[in-house]
Image: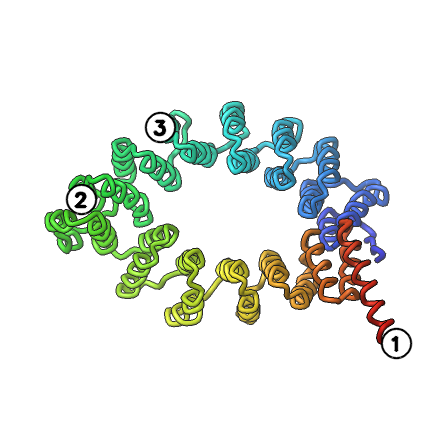
Amino acid sequence: MSIRWPRHLTPTYLSQLIRNQKNPLKALEIFGEAKNRYPNYHHNGPVYGAMIDILGRSGRVAEMKEVIYRMKEDSCACRDSVFAGAIKTYARAGLLDEAIALFRSLPQFNCVDWTESFSTLLRMLVKEDKLETTYHLFLENSCRWEVKSLTHALNLLMYSLCRIHRSDLALCIFQEMDNLCCYPVRETYLTLMRGLCEDGRLTEATHLLYSMLWRISQKGSGADVAIYRTLLDAMCDNGEVHEAVAILGKVLKKGLKAPKRCQKQLDLSQGNHECEASTHNAKAFITKALIKGTVPSWDAYRSLAVDLYSEGKIDKGDEVLKEMYDRGLRPSSLIYEAKVASLFTSGTIDEVVDVIDIEMVENSCVPTVRFYNTLIRGLCNKGKSDLALGYFDKMSRQVACVPNQETYEILVDGLCNDGKYSDASQMLEQMLIHSYWPGGETYTKLIQGLCLIGRPYKAVMLLEEMISQAKIPQISVWGSLVSSVCSESLEIERFLL
């Protein structure tokens, strides 16, 4: 397709032009040709960012690296998010060393804020269990003025230490946050509290809770109930029921700012007697107290319900939802998303259907794109891609709920796994109509599947589409096509004879 070049080229027009190309190499060709056609034109940061993003999403690592080098030569100002995206591309390709090298070369670029790329690189290293590299990288860059905020990086470091059961070291980092001019957030407390409790360091965990109460004593937050419950449940498991009930009283008064009228509804002394029966009773009493002993707060219910569902405690999560209904609070799609994910883990698919078809409808909760993606992924993983297709149609008809690239990728992959290659082919066509370009692995799986069910003509059309997007077919794809075409030729020959 020929390109209509304007009389005067602007970076905005060029960015739009290259983003409209489904072939990343064609986009790169246009990107390079612009300077030849317009001698006075110069690429700016958004144009370089668009080109790097296109090449990164298509897996063209070598070409992406070359464009990054050209950006450095042009001394072009570029946002930190561009480097963060390039680091993610390197990580997906298994090139963590290249990602580290790119970050360490940032002083050579015209970029004054490295916060996002720093956090992204640390997250990738933690995900790959490169803890020693994470530690050294943090030491090298934590004091640089280009890293504007260390809170997220410190949270990642503490999370990585808690994963290897070194919550004692994570606690040391927490204690140094003030010296680093960092303020701990809810994620900080939750990560460290879980790590300390898992390691059996309940004394340190209790001190952490008290420090948390001191920090928030002037405001309180219902969303912190998940942190409180983590410690109180761990104390009950350790047989420290009376201590847990005593701390519960302080949590209700200082942490959740429960008024006296709410505190009077709970007899904590009576709770001690009930809790002596069993650890289960103790935990149930504490959860009930955290729910009913405070002013109704949507944040508190959401935090507690999501936490319970993530632990697989569906019955307890349902109790929280019921309490929300009774107090006139409407559950959000985020809570139902956690419930659906928990139901898929437990294998109860019928209950998943009831959640979206009955429960959410009765409570006037409108599903979001993220909720639908969780639902469709879970159904496809359970081999129910036909049911997932039905919800995809429902999603498409819902106002302001447009399927995104992730939705299509989940469905195409799920249909292929269930052997429904014709349906997967139709879904891929819809994906292409909406200008979402699938990866080479998706094309490979679908082309081989179409050959398997005797649809070589359709497979060849997909192969042409794949090549038009500059994706290189694997040798196995050609083998499947040749085998399928030969089989069909034999069938035609037998029919004619």
Cα separation, mark 3 vs mark 1, equals 79 Å
Disc 3 marks which amino acid?
Asp
User: If you read the primary sequence from the N terminus, does the residue marked by circle 1 or circle 2 appear first?
Assistant: 2
Outermost residue on the right side: it is: 497
Q: Are marks 1 and 2 in contact (CB under 8 Å)?
A: no
Q: Is residue 148 above or below residue 27?
A: above
Judged by depth in the image, the label closer to the viewer, 1 or 2, is: 1
The residue positioned 53% from the left and 69% from the top of the image is 387
Q: Which residue is mark 3?
A: 168
Along the line of sight, which residue is nearer the eye, 345 or 261?
345
User: If you read the primary sequence from the N terminus, does the residue marked by circle 3 or circle 2 appear first?
Assistant: 3
Judged by depth in the image, the label closer to the viewer, 3 or 1, is: 1
Tell me the SS state at disc 1: helix
Disc marking residue 496: 1
Q: Which residue is mark 2?
A: 245
User: If you read the primary sequence from the N terminus, does the residue marked by circle 3 or circle 1 appear first?
Assistant: 3
Disc 1 marks which amino acid?
Leu
Disc 2 marks which amino acid?
Val
